[in-house]
Image (cartoon, rainbow, N blue to C red):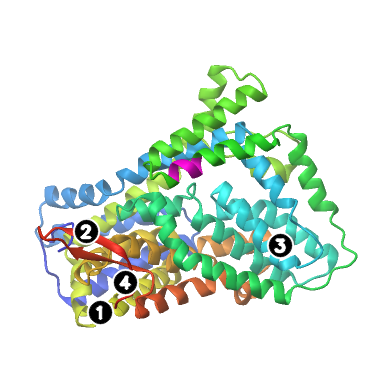
Amino acid sequence: MYRIKAVLRPSLSEAISLTIAVLLIISMGIIVFEAAPHIPLVIALLLLMVYGLSKRISYRTLEDGITEGAKSGMGAVFLFFFIGILIASWMLGGTIPTLIYAGFELVTPNFFFAIVFIVTGIVGIFVGSSLTTVATVGVAFIGIASAVDVSLAIVAGAIVSGAFFGDKMSPLSDTTNMASSTLKVDLFEHIRNMSWTTIPVFLITLIIFALISPEITAANFSQMETFQQGLFDTGLVKWYNGLIPLLVLLILSIMKVPALLTLAAGSISAIALSYVNGFTPLSDLLGLLFGGYVSETGIEAIDSLLTRGGLNSMMFTIGLVLLALSMGGLLFKLGIVPRLLESIEHLLRKVGSVIAASAFTAIGINVLIGEQYLSILLTGESYSSQYNKVGLANKNLSRVAEDAGTVVNPLVPWSVCGVFISGVLGVSTLAYLPFAFFCLLSPILTIIFGFTGKTLTFIEKDPGNETVPSVTGINN
């Protein structure tokens, strides 16, 4: 059964028509009018409410559907608050600047494309934002590529691949937290489970980039060196600034401490280091944790990379999550999603078909709407009960939502990520698409594992008839 009980059973034609209408409203708003996703979501929400009222569903029932949908996102909301605080504190304590500086130390003229992929991946993990990574170190690598006369399309593909690998596997990432929270999977358990598909794809991508990397013998790395020197001149780059908070985060995650407490401990350790490096008045510290860290080096690329974080920076994402889940709640309350799934239920009786269907749904939402958040949220809400029916634990679905949702968005020319990346790097989406190997291979591998049963976690019945997750299984 679905988490939200339907009060209506619309005809299949009505369900399809309403779904198309919602998709058109959201996609037109985002793609054609370049609006933030929030307003199209509000309009779609109103459309569904009008439909419900026309079917003589009481306003109170519709309101219950909205609040029931939004309720499932409250865990993510609190995590997002702590992520904003963690990012700001890790900037203040020098953790993120130190880790980025160390990443640049890996860059050499040999295996250039592979190095770009690795460094952007490292930066993406510690920054927790694919678009920030692309707009900062990605731009620096494009400048280096121009200077040494190598393919900008391949470099852009390596940047996008690394940035979205880092975003996908980062505990600071909003999409990673959204996928785990929506499906009630522990954040670090979600990341560990994603490694079954992500690490093989990472290695395959790394080998491909290493094989196609050109021989660069006389490279001008001055732009990268300027970037690196700018980081060093902040005075934040110290080995212990990068090591201690990272160790705190890793140790607590290995100990399976709840994500919220782990993020809080990581923040406290970085704040303590900031006082070791220099005194920060309490009033300034509290303001920074709310409003974010502001870098004032005078180097635009450095300031763009380091000026971020804070509780307030999460409000955009939190608003989007609550609106999307509210709309999802109405789609279930009005019976629209259940009716659509009912029409294809005869095809969703095996593990492989359920995983493939959820993956293609996440891809389809990216292509139709161009929004990665909605691809995660709607896929998770729509297929949770189907996964349960075939005996799959929710962490399988959260993994598929990221494998086929998060990383596909930059491959769509009219998507939020696609438009942003092509504008920032000066390379069209269609030009770098064939070389974004990580993004292309991730959904393929997750579907293959679905049909083979590899690395899947099944739910088993214990003697008391309670469901408990089994160890990672291989049975289909």
Residue reaching furthest front? 463
Which mark lies nearer to you, 1 or 4? Answer: 1
| Label 1 element class | loop
Q: Is residue 299 among the parts visible in the rendering? A: yes
Residue 20, which numbered label? 4
Which badge, 1 or 4, comes first in the chain's sequence?
A: 4
* Residue 472 on image: x %, y %: 34, 66
Q: CA distance from mark 1 to mark 4?
A: 27 Å
Which mark lies nearer to you, 1 or 2? Answer: 2
Q: Is residue 192 left or right of residue 423?
A: left
Type of the residue with mark 4: Ile
Q: Which residues are magenta?
A: 249-253
Q: CA distance from mark 1 to mark 2?
A: 20 Å
CA neighbours of label 4 inside 10 A, class few (<14), some (14 to 19), many (20+): few
Residue 468, which numbered label? 2
Residue 350, which numbered label? 1
Which mark lies nearer to you, 3 or 2? Answer: 2
Viewer-closest of 300 and 86: 86
Residue reaching furthest bottom? 347
- Residue 94 position by quadrant: top right
| Label 2 element class | strand
Q: Residue at x 58, y 54 (%)?
A: 131
Can residue 321 be found in the magenta stretch?
A: no
* Residue 459 on image: x %, y %: 23, 64
